[in-house]
Image: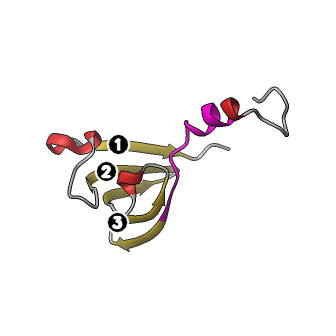
Amino acid sequence: MFSDSWNPTETEERERFSLLTVNAGGYELSGSQLVLRPQFALYPAVINSQATIEFELSGDTLTLTYVDVVGADGSKPPIVEGGAKRLLRLVRQE
């Protein structure tokens, strides 16, 4: 937390917000595949990139598998280098 809840220092803001990954833009959903096309992002390399994600919903668990990510310049980030896939599992808690 901040030393003053409503008035963080510049250092506190940088430390807190450096933990976030925020993107906004368009997406396309087809079958079990989601394609993201960020037009705004905190990381410049993500702007106008494309991420292809396969998803599966089973009960209260949503599994997202990043299949491919390509930057606007054609580069690929470390999470998919060499064909690697990144798995994210979200489980509903009550």
The quadrant in which residue 20 appears is top right
Q: Give the spatial CA distance, label 1 vs label 3.
A: 15 Å
**Residue 35: which numbered mark, if any?**
3
Tell me the magenta residue range: 13-24
- Measuring from the top left, give residue 93's x and y in whole percent: 62, 43
Q: Earlier in the sequence, mark 1 or mark 2?
A: 2
Callout in the foreground (1, 3)? 3
Per the image, the residue denoted by label 1 is 87
In screen coordinates, is 61 left or right of 45? right
Q: Earlier in the sequence, mark 1 or mark 3?
A: 3
The one of 38 and 42 positioned closer to us in this rendering: 42
Q: Residues within 10 Å of mark 1 (few under 14, many from 20)?
A: some
Q: Give the spatial CA distance, label 2 vs label 3.
A: 10 Å
Query: Residue at the location (16% across, 45% down)?
Result: 83
User: Residue flagged by tag 2: what amino acid is it?
Assistant: Tyr
- Measuring from the top left, give residue 9's x and y in whole percent: 75, 32
Per the image, the residue denoted by label 2 is 66
The one of 75 and 57 positioned closer to us in this rendering: 75
User: CB of mark 1 within 8 Å of CB of mark 2?
Assistant: yes
Query: Residue at the location (41% across, 70% down)?
Result: 27
In screen coordinates, is 40 left or right of 33? right
Quadrant containing the N terminus in the rendered view: top right
User: CB of mark 2 within 8 Å of CB of mark 3?
Assistant: no
**Residue found farthest to the top:** 3
